[in-house]
Amino acid sequence: MTIDMSAVIKLREPGLGQEWLGKERYVVRADAVVALPMLAGDELEIVDPEGLQPAQVLAFDAAGQSATAQLGVAPNTNGETIARMLDSDSPVAAKIRNKLKTLSVSLPAAKVAEVLSGDTAAGSSITLVSEGELVCLVGAPKPPMIAHEHMSSTDLSLADFPPTDLIAYITRANPGSVIAHELPDPLADEQQSFRIAAATAQSYEVKAGEYIQVLDIDGRECSDFQCFDQAQLDQGLMRYLSATTTRALIGSAYPGPGLYSKFYDVDFQPLLEIVQDTCGRHDSFGLACTSKYYDDAGYPGHINCSDNFNQALESYPIAPRKGWQAMNLFFNTFFDDAFTFIFDNPWSRPGDYVLMRAMKDLVCVSSACPCDIDPANGWVPTDIQVRTYSEKNLFKRAIAFRKTTDAEPEMTKETGFHSKTSRLTRNFIEYNGYWLANNYTNYGCTAEYWACREGVIMTDLSPLRKYEVVGPDAEVLLQACVTRDLRKLSIGQVVYTAMCYESGGMIDDGTVFKLGKNNFRWIGGNDASGLWIRQQAQEKSLSAWVKDATSQLHNLQIQGPESLSVLKKVIWTRPDQATIEELKWFRFSIARIGDESGLPILASRSGYTGEQGYEIFCHPRDAAAVWDAIWQAGQEFNIAPLGLEALDMLRIEAGLIFAGAEFDDQTDPFAVGIGFTVPLKSKQDDFIGRNALLGRQQNPQQKLVGLELAGEEIGGNGDGVFIGREQVGVITSGVISPILRKNIALCRMKVIHSEIGAKVEIGKLDGHQKRIPATVVPFPHFDPKKQRVQGNY
């Protein structure tokens, strides 16, 4: 029998990222530079994943002499653009500048080759081979997108489109036999820095306010962590991190993979808090590995983290234990449907870390786990690095976000409006890679809700994904990817639509803006939709580009009966654009704040609240000033900020669907109440999922309905809906409606039981031991004729 090894080496496993390609992978951030050392024969491949992104390369030798020609390309420009990109306050740029200074490299006079330029397609690449020992600078030059000038133009200009990242791959001519990963640069000046060898542990001390960074050097290596209150130890008491106490205080009824925001001891005293996490998958409820585990597995005497802890803590008045509770950093655990504890390969990749802040003087102990009998460390134990930093540093809270499994981690970012919203609240939650306000101090979700229903609010929804779809085939591409008929769109019009797989299951819902003959903008809830459009452009060989503009366009929603009263005070439009008073539902205008010299924006008559409202799009650099102008104009109308908690109340009442709640890739538009976005009869062009949707329309299995529940206990997402013992539906969202004074819910129901007036029960606990009576009612619950959203109060 012959084994097909190609099927083996292509397995995708946690923590491996792109390394299975056998290449070194570097991300060249938009309008930034990376430095890559190269030897003779090394290959450098530069890839433009999204298209239309220029690339420049500059090489110099050990003497600091320009040597770009030794990459096999002819220099065609100077180094002024690379010099501009390096003139930033980023640590990477500073490091490169300092290196160039020691070599006396003059960037403006350097000979540079622009190797990617013009109308490059998504996925375009060039491969260069080094003729000697060089340092190569690779840059992705491009100024910020001019988001307001190309909207009514049919001409394509590179300046119109957002700058995007490049990927650089290096294939070494003489790869080493041992793969060693370089430690990432410190986050600040280190107070302590030490390496914990594989299968060992080390103790250390930190003061209150200081930071602890635990790094996985080579990836897929677990590190158990425990800490003790130093003041309590001095009094002869052991007070250490307690998983059970932490879980109870945080309100996590069942353990789950991940780190809590704070960790407590048995006296309810906080010992430390989590500040940053680039991995996102840990176990914070288990024991450090023990001798019993290995004994019972048939490996008596195997070294273990609990014994290593005991040895590392011998100099402290800490009694040894057979098994220590611990934060199991980078340990990938989960529960199956029967709540059986399972673990697998860690998700951590080389350089991943967790950053914690001590809340008391602590004695800490960290391990590099010795387990080599299961996937806990990817079968190969490696080293762990620990660094500590002064309390004088200020590190922003962030967790990692990846668009795809092989993408680089993106740390949680602040939107352009954060400097304003953070003055009004400290209650932020992570949403799609950004921090958004959950609710606001001195308001609260109920007050924010009523401000929207009766007056005017502004809410930051910048994490919505924006993708520029441009090129001669842009309309053809989108016509194939979304369900609505875009050929009916005029320039300046917006349409709400679904996007589906061939199976008819939904990828996302969102809006398409027609900016020009060849210029469209897709705005959806997740990156999967934008990536899907780009994939279709490549597979169909269409002359169209799909460029991620999320970081270049941030947006506010101004919603409520008084939204127009506020905006007409501050928005100026050109004579060829509809004024804010003239703007009809699902139309947009190119506009400015104040007058013709004001900040550029795009204003659309759209929203996500069920009220008359508008969305304002601007560049993040202008966001704070745009907020101030609208906030000031709204004072006479008692304008209020609105967070995600109140927004959820509003959208549930209005029957507006949300990904992960009402729909996923198993549900179709008909099943979630947006069948109107699928014009199967009138849309002549074929689109992805059409045949499957035709069958689903003719043989519907589920339908989104409204429920009214008895009592005040809210129906939660995932609660079963029953008639007797039969489950006939599932709750997708629920809320106590302030304006209706009713307990309402959205439910995906079997069509046979979806008639108005049908009596059902919501199952709590195990679905049968506790039931809440409910009735199917007309849907949406609030303003079903959409009168308010059209301004008819």
Image: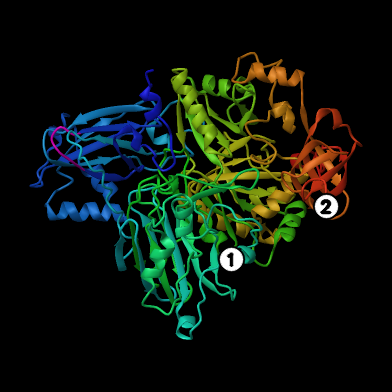
For the question of whether residue 151 can be seen, the reply is no
Q: Amino acid at mark 2?
A: Ile
Query: Magenta segment: does it hold 219?
Result: no
* Image quadrant in which you'd find residue 488: top right
Q: Nearer the viewer, residue 770 or 774?
A: 770
Q: Please tell me which residue is depicted at 41% across the width and 31% down the height of the picture.
A: 50
Residue 373 image offset from top left, x and y in percent: 41, 47
Q: Please tell me which residue is depicted at 21% across the width and 40% down the height of the picture.
A: 177
The reply to whether discs 1 and 2 touch (Cβ–Cβ < 8 Å) is no
Q: Nearer the viewer, residue 783 or 325?
A: 325
Q: Amino acid at mark 1?
A: Thr
Ranked by sequence position, the earlier of labels 1 and 2 is 1
For the question of whether residue 374 can be seen, the reply is yes
Residue 484 image offset from top left, x and y in percent: 64, 24
For numbered disc 2, what is the local secondary structure? Answer: loop
The label nearer to you, 1 versus 2, is 1
Rendered image: mark on residue 246: 1
Above or below: residue 358 compared with residue 640? below
- Image quadrant occupied by the C terminus: top right
Residue 609 image offset from top left, x and y in percent: 71, 45
Q: Please tell me which residue is depicted at 37% across the width and 74% down the height of the picture.
A: 314
Q: Look at the magenta stretch and give its main secondary structure.
A: loop
> Gap between marks 1 and 2, in whole Å?
37 Å
For numbered disc 1, what is the local secondary structure? Answer: helix
Above or below: residue 204 compared with residue 72? below
Residue where numbered disc 2 is placed: 739
Residue 598 image offset from top left, x and y in percent: 50, 49
**Stretch of the chain drawn in magenta:** 37-42
Q: Residue furthest bottom?
A: 235
Above or below: residue 477 compared with residue 284? above
- Give the side of residue 721 with respect to residue 506, left or right: right
